[in-house]
Amino acid sequence: MSSLRLAEVLTAEPAAALLLRNAVAYLASARPAEWRSVLPLPGDDIGARMALWALGLWDLSDTQNASALADSPQVLVVAGAALSAPVVARAKQCLDSGGTVLIINPTPDRAAALGDLVGAAVSMTPADLCQLVPAKGRGDDPLLAGLDLSDLCWLGDKDSEVILPWAISVDSPYAQPVLVSNRTDWRRWVYRGENLKPGAIQRCEDEPYRQQVGFLRVPMGEGRGEVLLCGMPVTPVSTKSMRVFGQLLTNLGVSWHRQAISSEQRAEFYLRAAGTVVQWLMLGPIRGKPWAELYSEDLISGEASARPVVGEIAAGAAWIPRQTSPIVNLSDQKWYGTLPDAAMYFAAYVRSPLSRKVLLLVGSDDDVKLWLNGVLVHAAQVARPVAADQDRVGPVELRAGWNIILAKVVNRSGNWGFCLRLVDEEGRPLPDLALAVDNPEARFVEIAPEGWQAISVPAGDVLAAWDRRPETRWTSGRPMDDTMHFTLDLGQARPVRRVVLDTSGSPGDWPRGLRIEASTDAQDWQVVIDVPDAAGIQQGGVTCVTFPTTLARYLRFRQTGPAGCSGGLYWSIHELRVFE
Ligand SMILES: [Ca+2]
Ligand SMILES: [Ca+2]
């Protein structure tokens, strides 16, 4: 029984999880006899080592057997980035003795060394996104035991697009793609990229059923071994994918431990590994005008200089942080559908340790404007379906410290979407970037719910709204109407600038219209925000609003949606939070 701590894999190298799957599937189905003669070289590729540990294989660092194996390994594992002349020489030895050289994630700067190794021209081009889905149910496949179709669909639903950084072409008639599991109920990778030569992985005719090819196999001829190129894809490491990996490992008799990856880790991983922004502060959709006006007009009174904060109200909606796919498909039903004449703003705060030139690679459906640190750097008046890297913007200057990237995407009709990658002048991602969910200059301090009191109409258990137990709630006890309010007394006047009404425990019970009024004496009231249609300021039942600092002892929350607005749902507040 082998043991693996997936938590370590996630911390050290999230993409190792996919390598793990490739390796487990391929080695388990194709080469069980050789499991114990695999040699990772060099020894510092954490992903490869983790995968090998999971399989109970030798590791250079902790076994003296490694030196014996080093003389004639049957499988030599090489990190693509480490493919230097001495390593190529070593790999050729392995091939000459009939062994297999497995090259993980080769990079374009090593294409020449790779070509030397396989004796054919090798080219690598940036690959597009691709998707994976199982062609059928799992059948009797022991490797997939315990998993149902919905588990497997993480590979292929619209939100789990996988980035393959490089499409590899080997100009050899013998090069052939290898299915990851060699199973007939799976199909192969589909690229939307171009420049794929014979022998490389190609477009599958059998859409929509698609499947991953784990390796590109290059047999080296009579008496010699073969080279396997694994263009290691980068995948979102979700709880669901971890469950799939976990079940695969369990099926293989490997014990394991899991630690979930946070949305922030996911976002940072995407940014650093592929340059892709998958966490945005979004505002919209904004409608009510023809698309051409949405495109040309400043819809938020200062779009160039905007420094949005989570919950800030603009154009009747609020800036809300969202996790997205690499290509944000706003036409998806979980977003907004095909919405004609609509605009959406996207903002991201990116920190660079140094000042440097970068490229912004933009895809949009349809028109797009892009600002970097308040300067308009791109404007494309164009109707098109969205794809990655449609427009190349720059080089532009990323400053040391925090930068703000702001985009406006306008849909003329039909589908709409957006994607952005941030790379260096050679098109490579920048592994030292960081991403912030909220404006990094905005510092909020939560006011402790001590000495608070409240009255509500209708009357209810107001204390449940700040007992810091998410399962308890204040509720209106009847369907929403515009007579309802909840008035909070903080006990003393405080400078307030953010409130959060958390109703995620009853996600439909958010106020349909929301007006917040503030007062220091419960006599004179000042309207802080007034949003008649509050759908655009809540997400998953959490309404977070941020406003200019307002001195308040009393805060009155009015539900302003008229009778019938909620389809019979009550108004509830599970937890109320106030910030200064
Ligand atoms: Ca469109
Ligand atoms: Ca509560």
Image (cartoon, grey):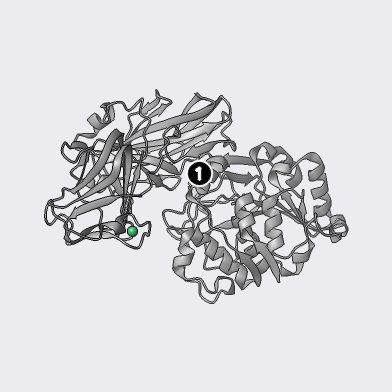
User: Residue drawn at (63%, 55%), measured in percent from left and top?
Assistant: 9
The residue nearer to you, when weighing 207 against 365, is 365
Q: Amino acid at mark 1?
A: Gly
| Quadrant of the drawing holding the N terminus | bottom right
Q: Residue furthest bottom?
A: 140
Q: Is residue 498 left or right of residue 567?
A: right
Percent of width and height locating residue 12: 64, 50
User: What residue would you read off at disc 1?
Assistant: 193
* Percent position of residue 26, x then y: 65, 63
Taking the spot 79% from the left edge, 62% from the top edge, the residue there is 37
| Image quadrant where one finds the C terminus | top left
Q: Would you say residue 126 is visible in this rendering?
A: no
Mark 1: which secondary structure?
Answer: loop
> At 19% from the left edge and 54% from the top edge, which residue is drawn?
456
Where does the image place residue 391, in percent across and percent down from the top left?
A: 44, 32
Direction from residue 233 to residue 307 in the image, left or right = left
Above/below status of 324 relative to 422: below
Answer yes or no: is residue 327 visible: yes
